[in-house]
Image: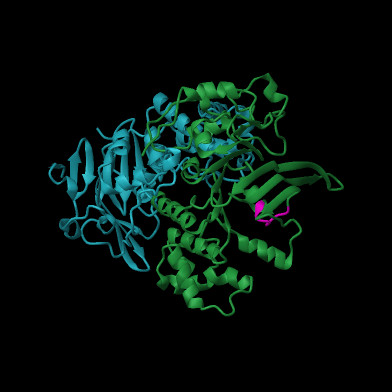
Chain colours: A green, B cyan
Amino acid sequence: MTKILRVEGLAKHFPVRGGLLNRVKSRIKAVDDVSFDVEEGTTFGIAGESGSGKSTLCMTIAKLIEPTSGRIVLDGKDYEKAKGQELRDFRTKMQIVFQNPLSSLDPHMNVGTIVLEPLKAIGRLGSMDKEKAVADLLEKVGLAPSLAKRYPHELSGGQAQRISIARALSVSPRLLLLDEPTSALDASVQAQILNLFNELQKELGITYVLVSHDLSVIGHMCDQVAIMYAGKFVETGSYGEIFYSAHHPYTAALLGSAHMVGPPENEEQFVLRGEMPSPRNPPSGCTLHPRCPFATGVCSETYPAMVDVGGGHFAACHNKQAVVAALSARVPQQSG
Amino acid sequence: MNLVEVNGLRLSFQTERGQLNLFTSLNLTLGEREILGIVGESGSGKSTLAYAVVRLLPGNAAILGGDIKFEGKSLLSLKESEMAKVRGKMITMVFQDPGTSLNPVFRVGQQMLRVIKNNIGLEGENARRHAVQLLKEVELADTEHVMDSFPFELSGGMQQRVMLAIALSSNPRLIIADEPTSAVDATIQMQILRLLRKMKAEREFSMILITHSIAVAQDISDRIAVMYAGDIVEEGEAQSVVSSPKHPYTQALVKCIPQPRKPEEQKLPLPVVGGQVPDLTTPPTGCRFYPRCPYVMDVCKKERPANYRVDGANVLCFLYRGGNERR
């Protein structure tokens, strides 16, 4: 297995300015010291709620915004200073699919033009049989070639998301960054799109980095999972480790509120109090401690280190043992 | 007596492509102190049904037949001025996005006091005490601070709690909640659902909960009605609708939600229904689900199915024709 993507100590801080001289008064740490590796042909999932920094992380990885510090290595190459041809090279290796398909498609272009746009941008369109290229791409995502002449407003949400995927696939990328790719879709359409992603991965060996607030989607798709809270990864590990042997109270709370269909569980123990802290004024110590049912004295003083709890499974919590003990009383039901 | 009874409701929209007959003959009942979850995907008519009850339909919608009764009285024959007294007082609403349903230029307290004055006639110190009491009931700490805040100064979860407090202010008989947890995060959604359960235990109201998520509906509803293309295709006790769905559409809806599976089975395909929701300006003849149904029979393409009673549920499907027909 080769590592297709390596992220090292990535941080994105936004300055907060104010006062008479508009000086930088403080910094919002939207993404703070995030590191991970993604193996080729697998899916890496990043789960978190709004404000956790997952979208900023996504945009930083895609080089849509500049990181404050840290390195992004794609396919063995550091693209930190990439410009011009080098940046185009980066874009052909990594493409993005966004949340809202209708707002990420140009309403003035027909479907055929939309899916070929990336090829045009990198200057590979010249000698191609355009009609065949469009038909091939549409077929890959399960759409009829006759759709090529349609405009975005004529498409359903599911069709529009398939077009976004076809457009991303046009340059044969090695890695697709999926930012909440099914959050705007109905449940039955979501299932179709998730199946499509898994079929494409099997067929093309493509790698995904999937960002979602929905743990049921993460659980269906991802080989490796990272849970993000207030700018940091708080727990990382394989699908099985995170879903069946969580060590962090935030992971436990997210799993408990994921609303997968099943008998309702009233586990007061895992309900977090209050809401995500303001990033302008984060709590001392562990950022979760004001909300955490397991918090003890040490939690308000020092931020816990990411500790290996076995088998490449890391968690940042002072009270891991208490969480594990409480969780062992309930195991998510396995189905199908 | 049922609090709400919808009988044979026929409702159409005028669209650019012609008349869209959404409801052809819809029936629904809601008991006292009952939470009914109406579940469906976009375009299924779940919101239209709820808004029809309070007569807040868009201009191109028309009720062509049937009746809606509230406490035994027909709401459709009321004058608009009489309906305005029912709305906000007897029936209140909570909308999906609290950020857009609170007025951004007034403090939370001012907005609450105005609603309290309009709907129950309380003013001054009494009204303020009532407002503080309501904010405590929805578990907001530091109520004075909340009253003095503008909506944008509160988080989404706090705003939704304020909306709930306003909806409770007139001690309504019915609350219509339209996707009340869809705009908030998972951990906040959990808190709001817990709060709704607590409110239901302490107060005497009924609720129509509109949601796209069958899991959310299952969490707090007594009964669930599943809608597809303007039809209630299945209606029954909440747990059994989810654990043993009868209608092929309900079965598909439950099965297509990803569940935690053993790692070796993790990525196996999710069961999906092929095709798309029909265009209701030219609906399929017969059952509206037949073009996508895995169990389609000849009769489904010709006739509209009736409601059949199966294990306590009402199911709009010919598969259950052997059972007893309700109407």
Across and down, in percent, residue B80 comes to 37, 49
Q: For the image shown, how many numbered marks are present on the structure?
A: 0
* Residue B174 visible here: no
Q: Is residue A315 left or right of residue B116?
A: right
Q: Is residue A7 left or right of residue A135?
A: right
View extreme (bottom): residue: A127
User: Residue shown at 62%/23% (left/top)?
Assistant: A319
Q: Is residue A279 magenta?
A: no
View extreme (front): residue: A1
* Residue A246 visible here: yes
Q: Assign the N terminus of chain B to one quadrant of the image.
A: top left
Against B320, residue A119 (above or below) is: below
Q: Is residue A80 left or right of residue A103?
A: right
Against B128, residue B28 (above or below) is: below
Across and down, in percent, residue B108 comes to 59, 37
Where are the magenta residues, as a range? A61-66
Q: Quadrant of residue A93?
A: bottom right
Of A49 and A308, the residue lying toward us: A308
Q: Is residue A64 magenta?
A: yes
Across and down, in percent, residue A59 comes to 65, 53
User: Residue shown at 52%/62% (left/top)?
Assistant: A164
Of A335 and A15, the residue lying toward us: A335
Across and down, in percent, residue A124 comes to 61, 74
Q: Which secondary structure is most common in the magenta stretch? A: loop
User: Residue shown at 45%/72% (left/top)?
Assistant: A135
Q: Assign the C terminus of chain B to one quadrant of the image.
A: top left
Of A124 and A31, the residue lying toward us: A124
Q: Quadrant of residue B197?
A: top left
Against B19, residue B232 (above or below) is: above
